[in-house]
Image (tube, rainbow, N blue to C red):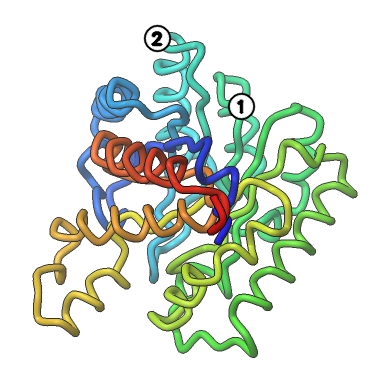
Amino acid sequence: MNQPVAAANSFKIMGVVNVTPDSFFDGGRHDAPLAGDAHAEALIEQGAQIVDIGGESTRPGADPVEATLEIARVVPVVESVHRSHPSVQLSVDTMKVPVAAAAIDAGASYVNDVTGFRADPELAGLVASAGVECCLMHMQGEPRTMQANPRYANVVDDVRAHLEERMAFAIAEGVREHRIQLDPGIGFGKSLAHNLELLARLDEIVAIGRPVVIGVSRKSFIGKIAEQRGIAGADADDRLPGTLAANVMALQKGAQVFRVHDVAETAQALAVASATISAQPTSAAE
């Protein structure tokens, strides 16, 4: 069976910097003055090609944050890291135009919107006019309610159709197609079964033709699988092995960008997986 060319030849690691008090895994660890800067520096040293900086938690049940507070959390980190590492791509994880605009002015060149420009449609115009890259993610509902009994006719078909519609909207608003990346939104309005089916059939999302971003890092579905098998994983601190396994499988299916908390470990796991995929013959005859 032929492997996706993108999986064998290229991947990027997006390191997560949550300057929030309430993110599900590292909330409160990097929101003190200078802590976000130091964490971003560490992720870059470990090999992150993109640093994703967020000032509003989107964990299940999270409350919204005012734009002014989000800007106050995010912009100083963007400014500092951009000044120290001007060649590293900085992403702002936001759904708000004022926050994205302030971050772009400070040096960000990537907007990661978990709502795919649904929360604030004018964000598409900002991305277009600024000429930056963006990630459009699928999320059923919104963070406070998304895990309340999510339902789909066919989760992969529904997510693919949603991402295609969001991409069409962005292009109509002036965003260049080559600047768009897509994220199926693992854990955002999905049950365990939905998440596993999306990962198993991720190549159908890859087939849309844009780089696919995958974000499985230490998420609760990994803990649920571990719990079912009576092994460690109930706590997010114990979910790194499962995270690495899911990312390797996503690489095999063609994902190209991996949003993670653990950059060094992910870099090594994906390097080995990528080298192995590249070493495989392209057909049974070979």
Q: Quadrant of residue 67?
A: top right
Expressed as whole percent of the image width and height from the top left, the position of residue 65 reads 46, 52
Q: Is residue 227 above or below residue 104?
A: below
Asked if residue 229 shows in the view, the reply is yes
User: What is the crowding at mark 2: few (fewer than 14 residues within 10 Å), some, or many (at least 20)?
Assistant: few
Q: Is residue 26 left or right of residue 146?
A: left
Mark 2 and mark 1 lie on one chain; the one further toward the N terminus is: 2
Q: Secondary structure at mark 2?
A: helix
Q: Secondary structure at mark 1?
A: loop
Q: Which residue is nearer to you in this view: 278 or 124?
A: 278
Residue depicted at 27% across the width and 69% down the height: 222
Q: Which residue is nearer to you in this view: 179 or 16?
A: 179
Expressed as whole percent of the image width and height from the top left, the position of residue 220 reads 29, 69
Q: Is residue 284 left or right of residue 265?
A: right
Expressed as whole percent of the image width and height from the top left, the position of residue 10 reads 52, 35
**Amino acid at dot 1:** Ser
Tell me the residue that label 1 is attached to.
109
Tell me the residue that label 2 is attached to.
84
Q: Residue furthest left?
A: 231
Q: Quadrant of residue 269?
A: top left
Q: Is residue 221 above or below residue 137?
A: below
